[in-house]
Image (spheres, grey):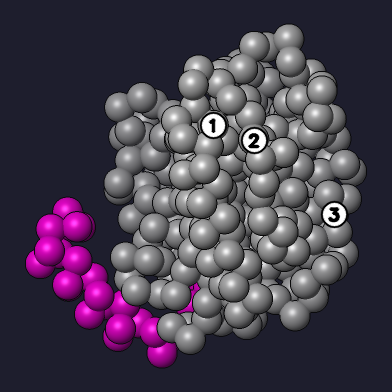
Amino acid sequence: MEWQTKVTPTPFIHRFNYQTPFLCIGSCFAAEMGARLQQYRFPAMVNPFGVLYNPASIALALERLQSGIPFTQDDLICSQGRYATLWHQYLYAHPDPDLFLESANRTLAQGTHLLQKAKGVIVSLGTSWIYRHKERNMIAANCHKLPADQFERLFLTPEESAKLLARRIAAMPEKEWIITLSPIRHLKEGAHGNQVSKAALLLAIEQLCAQFSNLYYFPAYEIVMDQLRDYRFYASDMIHLSPAAIDYIWEQFCTHVMDPQCYPRIREEEKRLKREGHLSI
């Protein structure tokens, strides 16, 4: 008897290898997979502006990385004595505005350089809900604990999300794009609100896949929802994924996205990580 609904990703045609520079951008799931790529010594950069959840912020980040335009004092916001920008995650904020700008622009320059070289871009979408800063008329990657009345909460339709990301994909047609929907739930929107948000993103992804031949959908969401549908595959908060779930998704990613010639090197790196205590399996 079969006790799981198996989800088998479609093999990626243009397999990646150790000569493939990656940029990983988006939600916590992009951070997890990007960290694995770095652990296994693939040439990868992960979220140069911090974790990003919605398509608008991801599109803005890609645009900024492509242009390489440095951040200035005009971009800064201050909240509770810490400085950042609306492009960045709150964890990047710093009490010294000059030190924040120095760090942000150094990381921006590194990200711009890697994006120019990158063959692969991994995008992970988390939510369709966005927050527009009213005064600056800009979608915030993070609200930075600013007063709620400074923001307008909006919902991106599938068409709006697809349009935002399509501009960035079309601007970099030489790259191979992998897009995924994060299986991590955004329960602050409520269980139903989370499902509506994820459904809208799936419809946007479907539109993008129909539009671009260099875009590949990796079904991480379906693997978790359909195949690993058990709370033993979740962390103690019952929202994020357990190490076992991340391990399984990583295995599926390697099997269906990586060039088989990478497998011996991946196994050697796994042995190294176990020796160093970075892997528990």
Whether residue 275 sits left or right of residue 241 in the image: it is: left
**Where 14 sits versus 246, above or below?**
below
Q: Nearer the viewer, mark 3 or mark 2?
A: 2
Circle 1 residue: 83
Range of magenta residues: 255-281
Disc 1 versus disc 3: distance between alpha carbons?
38 Å
Kindly check if marks 3 and 2 are in contact, taking CB atoms under 8 A apart as contact: no
Tell me the quarter of the picture where residue 115 sits.
bottom right
Whole-percent x, y for residue 146 in the image: 61, 17
Q: Amino acid at mark 2?
A: Leu
Q: Amino acid at mark 3?
A: Gln
**Could you tell which of marks 1 and 2 lies nearer the N-terminus?**
2
Whole-percent x, y for residue 230 in the image: 39, 34
The residue nearer to you, when weighing 5 against 179, is 179
Residue at the image point whose x is 55% and y is 46% from the top = 101
Kindly check if marks 1 and 3 are in contact, taking CB atoms under 8 A apart as contact: no
In the rendered structure, does residue 215 fall within the stretch colored magenta?
A: no
Q: Amino acid at mark 1?
A: Tyr
**Where 228 sits versus 103, above or below?**
above
Q: Farthest residue in the bottom direction?
A: 261
Circle 2 residue: 76
Q: Secondary structure at mark 3?
A: helix
Circle 3 residue: 207
Kindly check if marks 1 and 2 are in contact, taking CB atoms under 8 A apart as contact: yes
